Structures are given as structure tokens and as C-alpha cells.
Amino acid sequence: MNARMLGMLLVGTLAMGGVTEGAQPSVSPPTPGGFTTRQVGGTGTDATTTGVPATTRDNAAQIHGLHFRIQALLKQQKFDEAEAATMELMQRSPGEQYAMFYLRQIQAARAAREAPLKRIIVPSVDFRQASVADVVKFLSDISAELSADKRPISFVLQVPPDFTPATVTLNLRQVPMLDVLRYCTDAAGLSFKIEPHAVVIYRAKPAAPPPAATAGDRTGQPIPPPRP
């Protein structure tokens, strides 16, 4: 084979793609910063190209941070905060596949904590304008009497000194303790949460009022001052 034929053969091979010459771009999986292209088979330097608006990149970074926060809160067994963070995640990323996974974890953990209170069936409740302190003592005493291990459930009352809960009037028969607790706290204007070692009864913070609207007409424009 002469040199001319060898040259023609090499040119034909390159045209058919049998030999890759130079660097070819390859796209990596997406990251919060966008897509990163890198050179393969060459000595070119790395470069980052996104074409993604800065607001989109910022939102992706916040979503990434929310995942870490939710996972940390779940490990700390702070389920109320984890649920709030999951709701924020769903707002920022509708259809987020992990959001329902987080919510199922939270639901299962809460069910496990509620189980001891559901197993205790209170034979009768007869409160007539009872104070919250009296209600808490009753629940502690009845839990020690009816629980399988005869150990009382710990209740912690966290009420600010400047707040006086309403008294409780309630008459029930054969009701799970969890329901008794719910009815009593609702009647007193309080809330409760079940923590690993105690049931905490507290006053929920009132929702912040919406910002005051600026005086204006129905179009939202300021009302002009009256003419003299």
C-alpha cells in the first residue's frame, strides 16, 4: 500500500467517526448551580455554563438547604418544626417527591408517641369548672392507675404568668386519654404536644396580625386630599 492510499484510508476512518480526536463536551448531572460541562479526552480546562436565572439558582439552593434541615429535625425528633419545613419545601418545589416521604415519617412518629395515650381508656371524666392544674393532676393520677406498667405519664404545664386559662367543664365515659387531653386543652384555650418524655401543655402563640392596609380607594391607589 503506497503513502497516497494510506492517507485516503485515514481520512475515511476519521470521517466515519472511528477515531475520536480532540475533546468532546460531556454534561454532568444537574447541581444547584446548573449544569457543568467538562472536557473529556483532552486537556481543556473545566467551565461552568448554566443559562439559569439567578433567582432559580437561589431557589434551588434553598430547596437543597431545606432537605438538610428537615432531615436534621427528624433526627432531633422535632416533628412540628420538621412538618413546617416540609410545608415550605412543598411551596418552593411543588411535586417534590421527598416531601410525602418526610410527611409519612412525621405521621408514623407521631402515631408511635400517641399510642400509649390511646391505649389508656379513662372510665369516666366529670369536671365542673376545673382548673387546668386540677385537670393535669387527674390525668397524671389516672395514667398511673391504668397504664400497664403503673407508671404515670409526665405532664408539663407551660402557661405564661399573665395568662389565665379557662376552666374546664366536661363529662365523658370510656374515652381514650388522648381524646380527654384534646377536649380539655381545647376547652381551656391551650394546646399540647407529645415529646419523648412528657406531654407538654402550653399556650400557642397567637398568629401575627396582617399588616395594616394603607388608606386608598378600591383600586388600591391613595385617596387624594380633599380640595379646598
Image: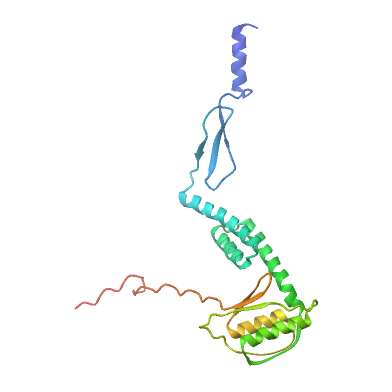
Residue at the image point whose x is 46% and y is 49% from the top? 54
Note whether 123 is above or below 226 in the view shown: below
Residue at the image point whose x is 62% and y is 82% from the top? 185
Residue 211 picture location, percent across and down: 42, 72
Residue 68 picture location, percent across and down: 59, 55
Q: Nearer the viewer, residue 224 or 119?
A: 119
Residue 172 falls left or right of residue 213: right
Residue at the image point whose x is 68% and y is 85% from the top? 137
Residue at the image point whose x is 53% and y is 75% from the top? 205
Residue 177 picture location, percent across and down: 72, 81
Q: Nearer the viewer, residue 142 or 114?
A: 142
How many marks the image carries: the answer is 0
Residue 120 picture location, percent across and down: 76, 80
Q: Quadrant of residue 10?
A: top right
Question: Quarter of the image containing the C terminus?
Answer: bottom left
- Identify the image's colour scheme: rainbow, by chain, secondary structure or one colour: rainbow
Residue lying at the far bottom in this picture: please name it.
Answer: 128
Residue lying at the far left in this picture: please name it.
Answer: 228
Question: Quarter of the image containing the N terminus?
Answer: top right
Note whether 75 is above or below 195 in the view shown: above
Q: Quadrant of residue 157?
A: bottom right
Residue lying at the far top in this picture: please name it.
Answer: 2
Note whether 184 is above or below 32 in the view shown: below
